[in-house]
Amino acid sequence: MKLIVVSNRLPITVVYRDGKVEFREAVGGLATAINSFLRATEGGRGLGFTKVLWVGWSGVKAELETDEVESELRERGLIPVSLSAEEVELFYEGFCNSTLWPLFHGFTVYTVFERRFWDTYVRVNKKYAEAVASIAKPGDIVWIHDYHLMLMPAFLRQLLPDLAVGFFLHIPFPPAEIYQLMPPTWRNTLLEGVLAADLVGFHTYEYVSNFLRAVAKFLGYRAESGIVRVGRRRVRVGAYPIGIDYAFFHDSSQRAEVAAEIDKLRQRLRGLKIVFSIDRLDYTKGVLNRLKAWERFLKEHPQWRGRAVFVLVVVPSRVGVPQYEAMKREIEREVGRINGELGEVDWTPVVYISRFIPTPTLLALYNIADVALITPLRDGMNLVAKEYVASRRNCTGVLILSETAGASHELLEALIVNPNDESSVAEAIARALEMDLQEQCRRIKAMQKRLSQHDVVKWAAELIHATALAYAENREAAYT
Ligand code: GDG
């Protein structure tokens, strides 16, 4: 029995350098999660899989793909789906990132409804299904990830009915009133697409109940105890909050390269309390609100000027999408303004980095930051919050977290804020910087306990197990 993981992108980046092809491991949330799971289960063998394959786009436009790239990928168990430049534009930048992403995060004014986007989304989802069908055998488990592939379970079921199919959504599922803004045939087809899976997973109960309400309102299917009946099939729908590789973060300061980076940064930032955040450049992450709150904090608590610094890392993403370019310029303008208005010759209020940072540097920052300021406007889960807490080996540090991030349902001991409430965020920063060590430790310990008990391996294993069970039940029902 094989496990076939399917996601929009393969967990690898193909780079052309001096006429040669190089493969780099991708570092995104999903890639890290599945790789930790594979490490812990001896490549899936620990769970009885003969093989684990991964199907997705290599990131290289079809026009540039070579046989060499393809065979190299296949050797690593990575099955590429090729996308033309037009498909990348209309499917990935179009329906995925200009329709589903903004709508599902509640950014309705950014949402574009375009027929060409939809048509390409349908076509590309079929392509992914065909790629899986070409390697799958009856009884294999197929684990489909995220909003890019919501129609795939249905297409796959048509091609190969006898497969165990699990679907997991990494972003929020919006309330029915927001989902309703989508044209009726699209929204119904998407729901039917997802419901062709045996198991559908979300990060939180809130997203589960939004989904079930949409299914009842638009398709008329009722759910009982998390099971939706679709004809003779029973689809299990549940909350499976993603975890992290707890030990990797908790032990990070013990590794030589991270320890060296910690020493270096501590030296450079000597005498300053460090407030830290890192996000992909995205309007959902609330970077501008956060900057405003930091400015307000410095104005209302002037005793902290010269004694605290905000290290703001914003990693480029979805380069080429106009909203993202505009937001980058606005962040740069705000950082410049705040530093210009409040900075001193020997103190800069905001240290701004707009690049991907190497993992040892990220781990060092998790270790030395006194406060993590994680204030997305809306976020499916937010792994950064969990990684920060796990990294606090010495039991100090304060997490400030938005109530609108999925992670707030688990990290209850964080200082929970509303990201639009500028003055409360500013107050939370002051409270965090002044919190006594005992209280810090009490909060961190409680959160660490939960994170260590529900790590990424457990998350993946539970989802796969639940998919296998749901499939077995459906199979039995089909033959009785
Ligand atoms: C989606 C959902 C959900 C980031 N910058 C660097 C870097 N990272 C790593 C972090 C973390 C991951 O990337 C980002 O994960 P997030 O969860 O914060 O955010 P999204 O990318 O939006 O992920 C989200 C997630 O899926 C999983 O389901 O939590 O809600 O939107 O692991 O550490 N790593 C390095 N350098 C960087 O500059 N090395």
Image: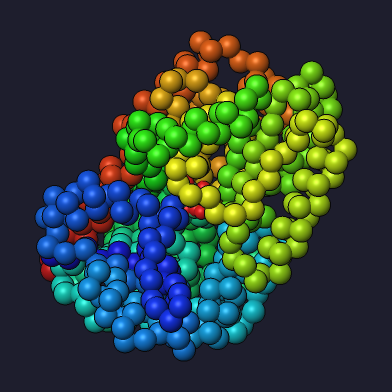
With 396 as the anchor, is 57 left or right in this view? left
> Nearest the camera: 289 or 17?
17
Q: Position of residue 13 (x, y in %)?
A: 42, 68
Residue shown at the point (32%, 35%) measured from the top left: 247
Q: Position of residue 180 (x, y in %)?
A: 61, 64
Q: Quadrant of residue 78?
A: bottom left
Q: Position of residue 99 (x, y in %)?
A: 61, 69
* Up/down of 135 relative to 255, above or below: below
Q: Quadrant of residue 195?
A: bottom left
With 138 as the anchor, is 134 left or right in this view? right
Farthest residue to the right: give it. 341
> Nearest the camera: 232 or 269?
269
Residue shown at the point (41%, 72%) measured from the top left: 14
* Up/down of 152 relative to 291, above or below: below
Residue shown at the point (16%, 64%) measured from the top left: 51
Q: Position of residue 86 (x, y in %)?
A: 55, 86
